[in-house]
Image (cartoon, coloured by chain):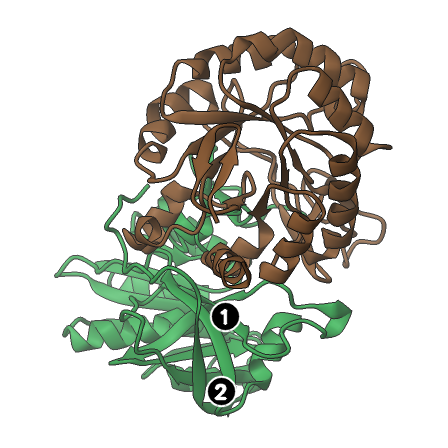
Chain colours: A brown, B green
């Protein structure tokens, strides 16, 4: 069951999707049992940005058939708050910590990577590239050339393994993955949420979500995630962390069979915080 | 916000229990279960509930997420819940019969805190919001505290819910039972009579906002049990936030659902959209 992810030893192949599990909150809700029964072999933090963000105005959630649309808006304490408040609490986890970061341009990403590089508590960096380019409005990660440019500018700013979290909102995810590979990524993770619109049932034509649009997750996107995982696995040699609607071990097995090294459980953890433990145990039984 | 040991904590992960009994009281569905693995909850705490079978496949292929439901009563290892069927989730939960499986996670959130010894408790509930107040009344009466209960309902059919709370004064919107008007009018009368009290309130946003305004204007402390759509119930999804006085958002599931009236942003409950 043990897995080597960029020279990080993981006890099993199940981790969390960024932003779908909050260790600090879970310790308040469940106490020490969170650490005693921790279901993930590594913990991926929510996205950290340079400046604090309060997140999007509610409504932030919309339930759909087999999933939900969220528009949370990456609330976080910012880099300084993360280092001072969150990191000491995350560092006590018994598993490796992967810190997810996002910047609006190469300069911001550089600052984030440089500030985190010396922190031994962090085993790897995951780079969220689902961020709009302020000039073009397109997500940096939706365009292979934009992504190459970003990675070329920041790759040297961290000595840690660099995982690029790919967006599914692109014409050809395999080309984006190839660009990541060619520009120094050590691994890729996919998929992020699919751009989605929730119509307000009471106000025709109006958005339900406070920020207008959101991202779809859950079993509703699993088949799409599987197709994108297969396409990326065929295009690159990099280790793949795959996710998208994984609810049980049988789902997880399909992603591993499609070429993923690691799977991440995300939305299913909302339905049951211990869901990933069932995925892990199910994979072990079948192995 | 509150510190680490501020609540009864839940076991990690969902567990499956069996429905032990059900009852229909007016439009409200009551169901009970034995939960030997869980701790005894505090009034104001809630559970995330889903049916063990056929969760999904209802109207619009929902529900998908579990639903946050207040606990009505807890005794030894027995839990009971009450809800009103208003959407695909509560509709499915209301269908559960004795022997059916229920998946639950909890208890979750911050419960109510006790009033100072000299103060009486005024419970102010609107509709299904009476549920956590019914449990609180039980706790306060058992502790020998003075409790005054005020409940507001839409009409006589909903006012059947008054039987969950003993000795409640009732107001109805249509005047069919008790005071014709708002429960917050009963609250003002009570405070005029004796303002040495702590208000505990749960109900629709308009009612809670009136209680908030009364509390802020009168200086009488109020604890509001809030409701918000939530995906997880344990602080993971950040979907259920409410705005507090410093302008920041806090999670209803983690820093609430019970929040002091003077901590809530003044424009929050009546916001548009």
In-front residue for pair B4/A91: A91
Number of labels in the image equals: 2
- Chain ID of residue with mark 2: B
Please give left or right for residue B138 compared with residue A187 in the image.
left
Q: Is residue B131 above or below residue B217?
A: below
Asked whether residue A272 is in view, the answer is yes
| Closer to the eye: label 1 or 2 | 1
Q: Residue at x 39, y 45 (%)?
A: A25
Which image quadrant is residue B95 in? bottom right
Choose the circle earlier in sequence order: 1 or 2. 1
Please give left or right for residue A256 compared with residue A139 in the image.
left
Residue A255 marker: none
Residue B134 location in percent, x, y? 35, 76
Residue A94 location in percent, x, y? 33, 40
Helix, strand, or loop for circle 1?
A: strand
Please give left or right for residue A254 compared with residue B145 in the image.
right
Residue B248 location in percent, x, y? 47, 34
Residue that carries the numbered disc 2 in the rendered image = B160
Q: Residues within 10 Å of mark 2 (few under 14, many from 20)?
A: some
Please give left or right for residue A15 compared with residue B122 in the image.
right
Residue that carries the numbered disc 1 in the rendered image = B49
Q: Are marks 1 and 2 on the same chain?
A: yes
User: Could you tell me how far apart the alpha carbons at marks 1 and 2 are, in whole angstroms?
Assistant: 24 Å
Residue A70 location in percent, x, y? 65, 46
Q: Residue at x 22, y 71 (%)?
A: B140
Q: Residue at x 57, y 86 (%)?
A: B157
């Amino acid at each position: 069951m043990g897995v080597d992810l960029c020279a990080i030893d993981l006890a099993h192949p199940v981790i969390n999707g960024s932003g779908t599990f909050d260790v600090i909150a879970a310790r308040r809700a469940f106490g020490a049992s969170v650490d005693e029964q921790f279901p993930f072999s590594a913990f991926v933090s929510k996205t950290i940005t340079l400046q604090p963000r309060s997140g999007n105005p509610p409504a932030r959630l919309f339930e759909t058939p087999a999933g939900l649309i969220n528009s949370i808006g990456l609330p976080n304490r910012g880099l300084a708050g993360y280092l001072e408040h969150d990191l000491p609490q995350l560092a006590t986890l018994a598993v490796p910590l992967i810190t997810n970061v996002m910047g609006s341009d190469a300069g911001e990403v550089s600052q984030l990577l440089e500030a985190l590089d010396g922190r031994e508590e962090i085993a790897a960096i995951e780079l969220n590239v689902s961020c709009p380019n302020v000039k073009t409005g397109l997500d940096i990660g939706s365009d292979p050339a934009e992504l190459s440019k970003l990675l070329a500018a920041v790759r040297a700013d961290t000595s840690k393994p660099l995982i690029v979290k790919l967006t599914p909102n692109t014409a050809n995810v395999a080309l984006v993955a190839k660009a990541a590979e060619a520009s120094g990524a050590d691994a890729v993770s996919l998929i992020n949420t699919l751009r989605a619109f929730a119509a307000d049932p009471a106000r025709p034509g109006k958005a339900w979500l406070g920020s207008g649009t959101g991202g779809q997750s859950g079993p509703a996107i699993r088949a799409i995630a599987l197709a994108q995982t297969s396409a990326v696995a065929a295009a690159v040699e990099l280790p793949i962390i795959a996710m998208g609607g994984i609810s049980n071990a049988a789902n997880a097995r399909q992603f591993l069979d499609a070429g993923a090294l690691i799977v991440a459980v995300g939305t299913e953890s909302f339905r049951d915080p211990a869901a990933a433990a069932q995925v892990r145990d199910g994979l072990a039984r079948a192995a | 916000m509150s510190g680490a040991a501020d609540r009864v904590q839940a076991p990690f992960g969902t567990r499956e229990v069996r429905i032990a009994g059900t009852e229909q009281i007016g439009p409200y569905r009551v169901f009970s279960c034995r939960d030997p693995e869980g701790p005894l909850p505090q009034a104001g705490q809630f559970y995330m509930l889903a049916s063990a079978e056929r969760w999904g496949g209802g109207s619009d292929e929902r529900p998908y997420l579990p639903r946050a439901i207040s606990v009505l009563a807890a005794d030894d290892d027995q839990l009971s819940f009450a809800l009103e069927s208003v959407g695909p989730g509560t509709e499915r939960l209301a269908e559960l019969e004795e022997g059916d499986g229920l998946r639950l996670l909890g208890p979750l959130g911050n419960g109510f805190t006790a009033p100072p010894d000299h103060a009486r408790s005024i419970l102010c509930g609107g509709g299904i919001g009476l549920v956590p107040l019914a449990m609180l009344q039980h706790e306060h009466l058992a502790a020998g505290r003075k409790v005054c209960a005020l409940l507001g309902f839409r009409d006589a059919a909903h006012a059947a819910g008054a039987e969950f709370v003993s000795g409640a004064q009732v107001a109805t919107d249509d005047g069919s039972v008790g005071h014709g008007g708002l429960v917050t009018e009963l609250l003002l009368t009570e405070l005029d009579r004796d303002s040495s009290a702590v208000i505990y309130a749960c109900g629709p946003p308009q009612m809670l906002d009136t209680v908030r305004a009364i509390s802020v204007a009168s200086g009488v402390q109020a604890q509001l049990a809030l409701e918000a759509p939530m995906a997880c119930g344990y602080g993971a999804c950040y979907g259920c936030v409410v705005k507090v006085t410093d302008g920041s958002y806090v999670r209803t599931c983690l820093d609430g659902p019970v929040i002091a009236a003077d901590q809530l942003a003044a424009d929050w409950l009546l916001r548009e959209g």
